[in-house]
Image (cartoon, helix red, strand yellow):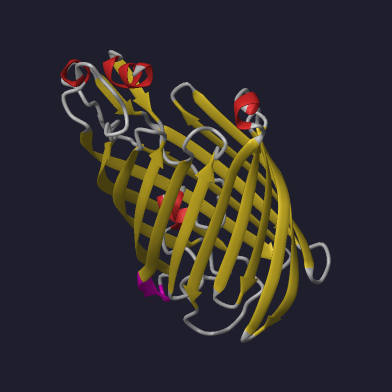
Amino acid sequence: MLGLTLCIGTPCGKSQDIHFSQIDINPIIYNPAYTGFFDGGARFGVVYRNQWASVSRAFQTVAATGECAVVRRRYYRDGVSLGVMLYNDRAGTLQYGSTAGNISIGYFKAIGNQGNNFISVGIQGGGGQSGFNTAEIDMEEPSDLMEKTTANFFTLAAGAAWFYQPTDELYFKLALAGHNLNRPNISYSTMSDAFIERRLSSYARVEYRSWSNISVLPLVAFMIQRNYREAMLGCDVKWYVSESSGNNLSFCGGIHYRWRDAALVELAAEWNSFVFALTYDANISKLTPASKSIGSLEIGIIYRTNSDKRVKRKALPCPVM
């Protein structure tokens, strides 16, 4: 009863976006500039997150994505890509959450003639519905608390990314994105506002192949959404078992730290066209007494078609060749 009153009756409410820890596994979720920005014909992904299973009913989020390049111009060394993302997010006794779909358009272009320096930009737009279910709660006068239990919304996002690989042993990735640029209102009452606040995120990754089949990949990510801040630092180690055509196999594992929130362990395996990832967040925030340090479990699967069937050492081979 109290939670519902605070959610609906507050003069000016705030809402946050869906959240995943696997930034690299399905990057289109974080930045529309990564739409179709990869080597291959098409990429499809599914990611599932179960958070705080020890606290009442867990937060559950699932997202599915698909993307491909629709135009590739070799002479101009650029291309245009399209992508789609669908997601559902539910939590708590009220099953509060949202269901939405977004469409992305990306443009990438090579800088210079070396094929190792690219920029990409993208925009994303879509809509959905947020809401909750009052079937499992008791209220004396429901009409006094709410006018509706669902709200439709439309969101806009934009992003930019840069990739540079001076040698086969070293690459740099940098990205910046803004979501909810239009601040959609998902209020359940005409007497109040509940905006999905603008979210700004940045991300940087480096891979250095220090041995013939071993590389280290430090990561820095930062996100801000009104009063909420999130900073993450970490490093992965990748073992390239085989890079021959038809038998591309590698394993990756690392530890990340989300500032004052969670310690993350991530494991991933890439086998030909598939990528499998498993992430566990151990909660170390102020919610620890209630959560018993149980954070979240996240599972991601990616399938990528390879247009030329050649396995290349570069982390992001030329997407227009």
Classified by dominant secondary structure, the portion drawn in magenta counts as: strand
Compared with residue 9, is residue 19 higher up or lower down, i.e. above or below? below
Closest to the observer: 5 or 233? 5
Compared with residue 298, is residue 74 higher up or lower down, i.e. above or below? below
For the point 50% across and 84% down, which residue is it?
308
Please indicate whether residue 96 sits to the left or right of residue 242 in the image: left
Closest to the observer: 239 or 133? 133
Q: x and y percent of residue 67 in the render?
A: 38, 65
Q: In the rendered image, is residue 316 in sight? A: no
Q: Residue furthest top?
A: 11
For the point 62% across and 22% down, which residue is it?
286
Residue 37 on the magenta span: no
Closest to the observer: 97 or 206? 97
Q: x and y percent of residue 131 in the render?
A: 27, 36
Please indicate whether residue 264 sits to the left or right of residue 113 in the image: right
Residue 211 falls in image quadrant: bottom right
For the point 47% across and 21% down, which residue is it?
227
Q: In the rendered image, is residue 287 in sight? A: yes
Q: x and y percent of residue 94 in the render?
A: 34, 33
The magenta region covers 70-75
For the point 48% across and 56% down, which residue is it?
47
Closest to the observer: 275 or 308? 275
Residue 259 falls in image quadrant: top right
Q: x and y percent of residue 99 in the render?
A: 30, 46
Compared with residue 115, is residue 103 higher up or lower down, i.e. above or below? above
- Quadrant where the N terminus lies? top left
Q: How many numbered marks are there?
A: 0
Please indicate whether residue 150 sits to the left or right of residue 105 in the image: left
